Amino acid sequence: MTTAAPLLDVAGLTIQFPTGTPVIDFGFAVAEGETVAVVGESGSGKSLTALAIMRLLPRSAKIAAGRIRFAGRDLLALPEPEMRRVRGREIAMIFQEPMTSLNPVLTVGRQIAEVLRLHEGLSAEAARTRSIELLDLVRVADPHRRVDDYPHRLSGGMRQRVMIAMAVACRPHLLIADEPTTALDVTIQAQVLDLLDRLRRDLGMALVLITHDLGIVGQWADRVVVMYAGRRAEEAEAGILLDDPLHPYTRGLLAASPRLDTSLHYTAGPLREIPGSIASAIAQPGCPFVPRCPLALPSCRLKPPPLEEVRPGRFVACPVTTAGERADAVAVGR
């Protein structure tokens, strides 16, 4: 039996700046209709990876190696006019900070309509009507009035819903949500994530959810990719990874993240921060997590550990935990 090719396949991605290489040999795949969470602290390279997929990296950056395939096409080889047709229509992105992403001098309706007129060729009247429908789709109250509001008149949660309406206007096959719940309170956070999941199901989209908070992904993600200093540290199904994290960094993220339960309240318990701060992906020859790792071995300082598949669909880049997994497998006869 053959396995269907993924909708999005990122492999060996390396992004360079004149001052360094913040993403090294990174990759992940997303299947049709799947939600994949890419998780890591600020500075891990998550947003740069998303911008590389959209081909919106700053001019000072270059993709030094790797492959980005979407629906069978090599995005890195597409001419810019063709890539512009892909953006918004086939792949859409919700950027961080909706207040700075939205144009403050244009009404939200006009900004949504611009997407529709560009990609769908709608008239001004038809685009306005569709904009109102989209605001209603993302559950903005009184959309007929809100369509003429300016961004500063909307709350943070409402502005985020406007950004989502713009992103799904053309029913893209893939939606990338970059920190969509940053600076929102816990109740609005849950509402936005629930909205994204509903739209994913209703519109048949795949979703890449970029976040620094492992505590929010369990209910909405199918798989989780943990990213540290530009590299993939661990990958597994969401439930498995949250119940039994293998990489010391993943364990640290979970210990530092409040867990959101189904009643929209954070679970109680003390949080423990990861000591130190994230290092450059090229600051040292070994594993970049060594300075912060409680389990580091002398060999960890010599070269970055390879990503190993310790169980089907379960990957981790840590010699300590992979050795433990192999020992456990032998003990139970796997």
Image (cartoon, rainbow, N blue to C red):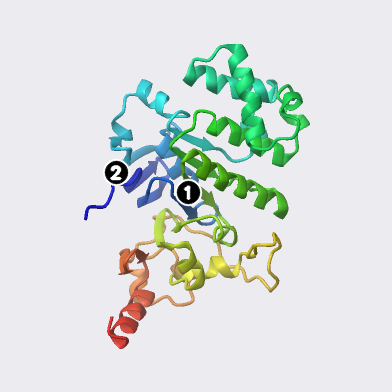
Residue 322 screen position, x and y as percent: 34, 74
Q: Residue at x 63, y 39 (%)?
A: 97
Residue 68 screen position, x and y as percent: 33, 41
Q: Residue at x 45, y 65 (%)?
A: 289
Residue 6 makes an appearance in the image: yes
Q: Secondary structure at mark 1?
A: helix
Q: Quadrant of residue 228?
A: bottom left
Which three-letter amino acid code belongs to the residue tagged 2?
Ala
Residue located beneath label 1 in the image: 46
| Mark 1 Cα-neighbour bin, 10 Å: few <14, some 14–19, many ≥20 | many
Contact check, label 2 and label 1, Cβ < 8 Å = no
Q: Secondary structure at mark 2?
A: strand
Q: Quadrant of the N terminus?
A: bottom left
Which three-letter amino acid code belongs to the residue tagged 1?
Lys
Residue 270 screen position, x and y as percent: 68, 73
Residue 65: which disc?
2
Q: Is residue 262 above or below residue 182?
A: below
| Mark 2 Cα-neighbour bin, 10 Å: few <14, some 14–19, many ≥20 | some
